[in-house]
Image (spheres, rainbow, N blue to C red):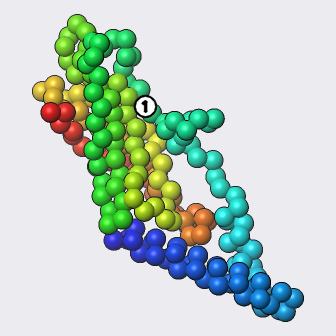
Amino acid sequence: MFYLFWALLNIGLLIYFLYLFTKVAGVLGNKIGRFPAYFFALALLSFVCHPYNNKVKPGTNEIKKWGFAVQDSLEQNSLFYKEVPFKTTPISKYNIGFKYGTVKYSKKLVPLNAYSNVTGLVIGTDWTPNNIIMEPTGDGQKFHYIINATTEWRLLGFPVYTQNQDYTGTISVN
């Protein structure tokens, strides 16, 4: 529920910013006070500069993946892909997606690589996965995962609070 409140707060501040923008454009030359002028300038700067997105490889649109096995060690035509949500908020879903396959000689299922993403309405937060660990469980039909991620809470683009979280769970591949 807090995610929804934070998004609405950011939308409200954006509307206030747009109101100030039109007020400044309408007044052009008249004094409007220091606070609205400073607020306008800071908000404008926050939209102009955006931090480097480390979820995407530089120079490509490919999302960052964590590798666990070499594809050559797997049987041909044994690669599968699965994406499941591991956290749901009222406005977004946090997903883990991974490829897995069967090892040639042991016939065990192993993860090949994994990534994580967010779908839905993402306003005022910047969620970045830092590390993903994935390994098969003892029964061979499930994978245990650990995702370490950072959520940066922002107001009009300015970082307010940074939160580190670990997510763990088990995914069945059947």
The residue type indicated by label 1 comes to Trp
Q: Residue at x 35, y 24 (%)?
A: 112
Q: Residue furthest right?
A: 29
144 in relation to 128, above or below:
above
Residue named by callout 1:
66
Whether residue 56 sits left or right of residue 44 in the image: it is left
Residue 140, position as x, y percentages in the image:
16, 25
How many marks the image carries: the answer is: 1
Residue furthest out toward the top: 105
Residue appearing at x 83%, y 86% in the figure: 28
Quarter of the C terminus within the rendering: top left
Q: Is residue 134 visible?
A: no
* Camera sees residue 172: yes
Give the class, few, some or many, for how many residues have Cα within 10 Å of label 1's Cα (few <14, many ≥20): some
> In the shown orientation, is residue 112 left or right of residue 128?
left
Q: Position of residue 133 (x, y in %)?
A: 35, 34
Residues 163 and 170: in front is: 170
Q: Residue at x 43, y 31 (%)?
A: 66
In the picture, measured across the screen, residue 13 lies left or right of residue 50, that is: left
Q: Is residue 100 left or right of residue 116?
A: left
Which residue: 54% across, 65% down? 154
